[in-house]
Every structure is written in structure tokens, then in C-alpha cells.
Amino acid sequence: MSTAVTPDLPAEVDLRTAPGVLEGARDLELTPERCDLPYWFDHVAGGMLRQLRDGTIPDPEPTAAVLTPGPLREALVTEFAFRHLAEAKATRALTQLVFHAPDEACLEFFSTQLIDEARHARAFRDHLLRLGVPAGELAATVRKYAAEDGAAVLDPLEKFGLGVLDTGDFHGGVLVLTVLVEGVLAPAAELSERKWRRFDPAAALIERAANVDEIRHLAVGSAVIRRLLTEQPGQRQRLLDVLGRGHELWQRLPMADLLLRRETLFQQGLAEHAALAEGYQVWPDRLLLDTTAQERMAAAELWSHETQQSRLAYMLLAEGDAA
Ligand code: FE
Ligand code: FE
């Protein structure tokens, strides 16, 4: 076991120093030129992922609270099965961003994002094994817990994103992925990281590592849009139209129902295993034990709204910006 990580590991990919989603997803600036293949090999594979492999970041165990049947375990399995499906879909959709990449820098960056999403899909799925789901039942478990939600929420998003990319609109595709998919899901993942920390620190670590990647995806995706609109401001209306259609779609998706079911199960589990969450603040000055399902949903929604607004402003797509 070694604690010596490459000394020049940039803060944004160092699991000990990387910002949380709420700061990083709003402010961090990264470009596709910076996050090219050598960056990924040196700092992600040889940096962050090495920290997980070599014990720099200890690998904790899930607690008995999620290993034994009950609503808390149910909430975790439901959430991770859904995340597996979402990440697998993102991986497949990224093939089209790679295909339509307009230059070498975007080709390399989105290739790394494709691998990141495939890694996430595997991490969420493999955690189910750690929770005691037999390997032979993995696919059936994912189907049982997440297929319906996936069909209701993920399939329409996928159809929309691929429809934009089908027209060869690379930047429209980046916008859909960055604002409408990752911009919404990343703050939810931040909530997840915080919620599970006491009950399943291993699950929280998976979220943490995935969130460090998501910050990079959000930052580079928005830099790509910002550059296009700086060089070709005439493209702005077209991208705003894509965004408008995407927001309309979101209004129709039953995401609130899904989150309410998820948080309600968690709430039951929280009551059952309250001792484990004693004194734990889910965000500053707020004890997890004092929160309700609705309050956590509202917090994640606010975070996602704020993240979207600051990213849209950075991309030159904020409402007040002149065309
Ligand atoms: Fe991901
Ligand atoms: Fe991502």
C-alpha cells in the first residue's frame, strides 16, 4: 500500500482534494485540449483510479443496514440499478458524440468520457454484487428494480438526444448531454453521495469517484459550447431551441415520482437505522435524521437548478444574454 500519488495530480482529479459537485460543476474551467488522452491516462487512470486501487483512499465496507433485507437496502438497490442503466445508456450515446466530433481534441475527450461512463455503469452494477446479489441474478435484478423507471425516464431522454445527433448536430448533442442529462443528474448524485455515507460508505465512495468525473464532463462540455458561441454567435438561437425542446420533454418525464419513491424508501430505512446517522449533517447545519423525503428532493432540485443556471451563463446561453 502506498500513499505516494503522482505529485502533479491536478486537484480536480485527486479524490482527496477534488471539489464537490456543487462547487466544481458550477465554476471549474477545463477544455477538451487540456483533458486529452494523455491527461486521462496520467491523471484519471494513473491518478484518481490508482488512488482507489493502491489504498490511498481506503475502500470501506457496506454496513449491515444495507446488507440485510429492508427498505434501506431496497432504496439502495433501486437507486444503483437505475444508475447502472443510466450510465450504460450514456456510454452508448457517447459513441455518436465521438462519431460527430468536429476536431481531434473533441474526439479524444469524448472518447475518454465514453470510457468514464462505461466505468460508472460497471461500478454501480458491481456494487450490487457487493450487496450480496448473486452474479447470476445481476441482470434480472437490474431489470426488476429499474427497467420500468428506465423506460419511463431514460428511454425518452435517449431518443431525444440521439434525435439531435442524428442530424449531425454535435454541439446540440453536447448541450443535451451537458445541461439536460448530466446537469440534472450530477446534483442528484451529490445528494446520493451524502445520503449513503453512513449506511454504505462504499456506495458513497463510488458516487464520489463518479462525481469527480462528472465535474470534468460538465466543465469540458460547457467549454465546448462556450467556444462555439464565442466564434459563431449566430448558432445561439439554434441551441436555445434544442434546450427549449429538452426542457419541454423534462416536464413530461415522471422524474419526481421516481425520486419520491426513492426518497420515501430511504426515509423508512432512515427511521429503522437511525442510530447510524446520529449527528451526521447531510449539508451544513442540517442533520440527515431531521430531513424528510420532500426536503431532500427539494434540495437536489435547487442544486440542479443553480448548477444549470451557472453553466448556461458560462456557455453564453443565459436568458438575459444578447443574441
Ligand atoms: Fe457517469
Ligand atoms: Fe458523465
Image: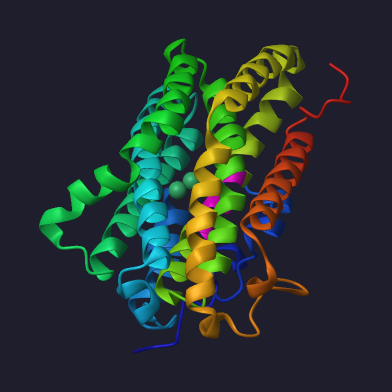
Is there any visible trace of residue 32 in the rendered image? no
136 vs 293, left or right, is: left
Seen in the picture, residue 55 relative to 129 is either above or below; the reply is below
- Which of these two is toward me, 152 or 207? 152
Measured as percent of width and height from the top left, residue 262 is found at 49, 52
Q: In which quarter of the image is residue 312?
A: top right
Q: Give the residue displayed 48% in from the left and 75% down from the top.
A: 272
Measured as percent of width and height from the top left, residue 228 is found at 67, 25
Q: Does 217 lie within the magenta span? A: yes
Q: For the image shown, how many numbered marks are present on the structure?
A: 0
Q: Give the residue displayed 61% in from the left and 41% down from the top.
A: 183
- Which of these two is toward me, 37 or 220? 220
| Image: magenta residue range | 211-218
- Which of these two is toward me, 22 or 255? 255
Q: Name the magenta segment's main secondary structure.
A: helix
- Which of these two is toward me, 147 or 236? 147
Q: Quadrant of residue 85?
A: top left
Q: Does 215 lie within the magenta span? A: yes
Q: Give the residue displayed 55% in from the left and 67% down from the top.
A: 195
| Way the structure is coloured | rainbow
Question: Which quarter shows the C terminus?
Answer: top right
Q: Which residue lies furthest to the left in this view?
A: 136
Measured as percent of width and height from the top left, residue 131 is found at 28, 69
Measured as percent of width and height from the top left, residue 129 is found at 23, 65
